[in-house]
Amino acid sequence: MCFRPVSVKKRLVRCPKCEEMNPLPLSIESAMSEIMANENGKVILEKYCSVMTGDPRFKQAMNMTLKQARPMSGGKITQEMVDLVTKELAELPVNNVCKSCGEILPI
Ligand SMILES: [Zn+2]
């Protein structure tokens, strides 16, 4: 695998009440570092992409999305894996409450 650095914008949503920045729910557009930082996301990524998450060079791909990393993975990440991860991330419970004040976020 050979990854070139790509930066992904942090996906955040501002609380309309207290202006605290909250992370958006995980999706296939999330950087893999974001997914791996989430307990549920980590399980999904490791379930389908252990060939990648177990690779020592995975660190270099952490700031990319899975879709960005796929063409650079030398075939290790397949479209099927991307589809499965997409589906499972979409099924995770969405936390749309501000972590600071409890306001419902406009997600
Ligand atoms: Zn708030």
Image (cartoon, grey):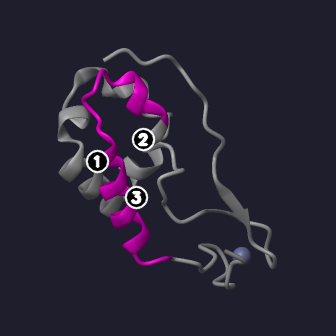
The residue drawn where x is 66% and y is 74% is 107
Residue 81 bears which disc, if any? 1
Q: What's the distance in space between the residues labelled 2 and 3, CA to CA?
A: 9 Å
Name the quadrant where ligand 1 sits: bottom right
User: Cβ(mark 2) to ligand 1 < 8 Å?
Assistant: no
User: Residue 44: x percent and y percent?
Assistant: 27, 57
Q: Which residue is mark 2?
A: 66
- The magenta-colored residue range is 68-94
Q: What's the distance in space between the residues labelled 1 and 2, CA to CA?
A: 9 Å
Q: Is residue 53 left or right of residue 100?
A: left
| Residue type, label 2 | Leu
Q: Which mark is nearer the camera, 1 or 2?
A: 1
User: Residue 26: x percent and y percent?
Assistant: 48, 60
Helix, strand or loop at label 1? It is helix
The residue drawn where x is 47% and y is 49% is 34
Helix, strand or loop at label 3? It is helix
| Residue type, label 3 | Thr
Residue 80 colored magenta?
A: yes
State which quadrant residue 56 falls in: top left
| Residue sticking out furthest to the front | 79
State which quadrant residue 76 falls in: top left
Mark nearer the N terminus (3 vs 1): 1
Eyeballing the image, is 71 above or below 95?
Answer: above
Eyeballing the image, is 93 above or below 23?
Answer: below
Q: Is residue 82 left or right of residue 102?
A: left
Q: What secondary structure is the stretch in magenta mostly built from?
A: helix
| Residue type, label 1 | Met
Q: Are marks 3 and 1 in contact (CB under 8 Å)?
A: no
